[in-house]
Amino acid sequence: MRRSAGRLPRARRRLRLGTRLALGLGVLSLAVFAVVGTTLTAYMRDYLEQQLGTQLKLVQTVQAKDAAAHGTVRRKPYYGWYTAVYDVSDEAVRLRRPADVPEDTAAFTALARAMARSDTELTHTARIDGEGTYRLRGCEVRPGVVLVSAAPVTDVEETVERLITVQVVVFALALAALVVAGRHLLRRGLKPLSDMASTAHGIASHDLTESAARLPLRADGRDGGPEVAELRTAFNTMLEHIDRSLAVRAEAEQRLRRFVADASHELRTPLMSVRGYADLFQYAAADAPGERERHLARLRAEAARMGVLLDDLLLLARLDAADAGAPVRTAPVDVVELVRQAADAFRAGHPGHPLEVSADPGPLVTCLDADRIRQVLDNLLTNAAVHTPAGTPVSVTVAAGPGEVLIRVADEGPGIPEEDRERVFDRFYRVDKARSRDRGGSGLGLSVARSLVRAHGGTVELADGPGATVFTVRLPRGGRRDLPG
């Protein structure tokens, strides 16, 4: 029994939602039909019995007059009805003859005896052998004389049985039609959910491990009502979110692959140089002592190059971890003075590039990390010097905007090709496709500058045109919150 009881819930769970709803609707309808049928049958039975009682009373009124006039009932009642007159003046109850009674008169005699002790009319339902069930009614014709009339209840019972049969047939047909039509309507109404399930299965079969995985599937349609429309909208919104997340992941993977390839390339070159100069130092130092210092200088230069590259990578990694706190310490700084210091260092290191500084008179004080913004200025100025021929003018402009500080670094060089402008801030990206170390560094300068400015809550923009390249640094006037380094 327990095993059978456990199978039923499992079988019910395997049914589809539309089938379960249709069956539930059928069970509910069956309960409603049972209540309606029982109520209707009880009401009809009471009504017919009341009608029979009223008819019996009317017939008995006529028969009572006949019995009072002649001592017995001479007028025959309806077919199947019975009438008897009893004398109950003494202890004995005697039936007057002639009388229209069945062979079994026990019920008639019992009612007449009860009337002898009653002051009101009595009604009783009894079973008469060989005849069936009868409704008996007794009334007093005159003192000591009682009239008992009986009407068959067979017609009432047959009518009730026919009513029950009609109800069972009609309710069964109505229940079957309701279940079938309800199943059809529910299947049609739940079709949008089935379509969404098919869409979900299609997504599940989609290969999401591809680097450029996309989800072209969407749940469409307009039927199903507002609830299904809300579910469809939420479903499509979720798919859009997953699609965007996959696109971001694919882009991040591509950037990671490009980053690893570029970092490997940039580190491989100085490492090979260090290895080559080390071999030269090992084999040539004893025979040519004059070469030792030159080899050591090249070793130190390549080691310094790797150190700068690793320092930039470490700084970018720390800047990427913005939630853990960007490595900036803010303090009130005069931006004009900071720009002049960077300009003096640029003139000393790049005397072949004339530099002009333009700033509003007076100090321009805001909260920022002086060392980090100085690094941004140095990177932008170095970028202008490296990618322009000697003698190219360079200018730096400092101005105060509404709630921000603007620093523009411009040069009058050949400019940046249009196809490279969107990627100049990418890590290890260089306009020089040959990656020559004679022109440019590792390709991290602009990436470091943008990350440092973002750490201060600002932006770096590139405005490039024929014969001019302008980098605009926007820093909030109040500075960003003081973050631990």
Image: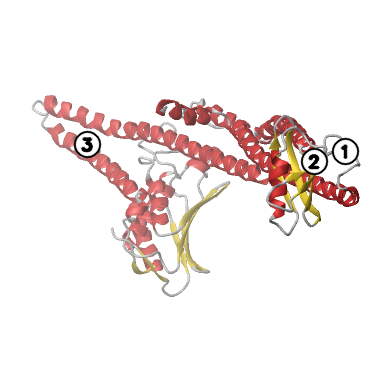
Percent position of residue 109, x then y: 71, 43
Seen from the viewer's position, the closer of residues 353 and 421 is 421
Q: Position of residue 31 (x, y in %)?
A: 64, 40
Q: Is residue 273 left or right of residue 402?
A: left
Q: Residue at x 64, y 34 (%)?
A: 22
Quick one: label 1 or label 2, which is nearer the N terminus? Answer: 1
Residue 391, x across and y down, in percent: 45, 49
Please report whichever mark, 3 or 2, sits nearer to the chain's N-terminal start.
2
| Image depth: mark 3 or mark 2 in front | 2
Mark 3 to mark 1: distance in Å?
138 Å
Residue 86 percent coordinates (x, y): 77, 47
In this rendering, would 337 be left or right of 304? right
Cα separation, mark 3 vs mark 2, equals 133 Å
Q: Residues within 10 Å of mark 1 (few under 14, many from 20)?
A: few
Q: Amino acid at mark 3?
A: Arg
- Label 1 and label 2: CA atoms lie apart by 9 Å
Disc 2 marks which residue?
151
The answer to whether marks 1 and 2 mark residues whose Cβ atoms lie closer than 8 Å is: yes
Q: Of the residues tagged 3 and 1, which is closer to the observer?
A: 1
Q: Position of 381 compared to 17: left or right?
A: left
Kindly identify the amino acid type of the residue bearing the numbered disc 1.
Answer: Tyr
Q: Is residue 174 visible?
A: no
> Label 1: which residue?
78
- Residue 172 visible in the shown view: yes
- The residue at 15%/32% (across/down) is 291
